[in-house]
Amino acid sequence: MVALTTLSAGQTGLIHSLQGGHRLISRLASLGFTPGAPVVVTRNYGHGPIIVAVRGTQVALGRGEATHILVYPAEA
């Protein structure tokens, strides 16, 4: 289990859990980040926002937000 920010562009993972305060978890859940949902990293340059596809929608997340999303990386 790793933070979403550690995945490279093109990698897929399954969301395990969300960590943080109630407001952050509610915001992420409303965007589709719920446990068990597959997520694909579209862009991750190592700085700036990370862009991911979740539930058929592309979402840009700040690095601080993305570190609170824990995923199981898909086996290559």
Image (cartoon, grey):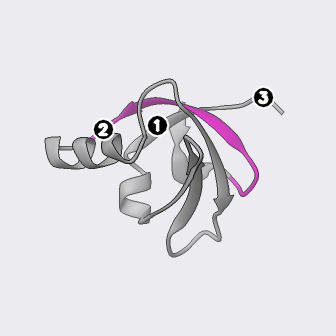
Question: Is 40 in front, or is 18?
Answer: 40
Q: Which mark is residue 38?
A: none
- In the rendered image, residue 16, in percent from the top left (x then y), is placed at 47, 27
Q: Amino acid at mark 1?
A: Leu
Mark 2, residue position: 19
Query: In the figure, 36 relative to 21: above or below?
Result: above
Quarter where residue 2 is shown: top right
- In the rendered image, residue 27, in percent from the top left (x then y), is placed at 27, 49
Query: Which numbered disc, 2 or 1, marks the residue that appears first in the sequence?
Result: 2
Q: Point out the residue furthest to the left here.
A: 22
Mark 1, residue position: 70
Query: In the figure, 41 relative to 48: above or below?
Result: above
Q: Amino acid at mark 2?
A: Gln
- Residue at horizontal 69%, vertical 40%? 12
- Residue at horizontal 38%, vertical 48%? 31
Mark 3, residue position: 75
Q: Secondary structure at mark 2?
A: loop
Query: In the figure, 3 relative to 76: above or below?
Result: below
Does the CB distance between marks 3 and 1 fall below 8 Å?
A: no
Does the CB distance between marks 2 and 1 fall below 8 Å?
A: yes
What span is in magenta? 8-19
Quadrant of the image containing the N terminus: top right
Query: Which numbered disc, 3 or 1, marks the residue that appears first in the sequence?
Result: 1
Mark 2 closeness class: few <14, some 14–19, many ≥20 residues within 10 Å: few
Q: Amino acid at mark 3?
A: Glu
- In the rendered image, residue 51, in percent from the top left (x then y), is placed at 57, 62
> How far is disc 3 from disc 1 in space, using C-alphas?
16 Å
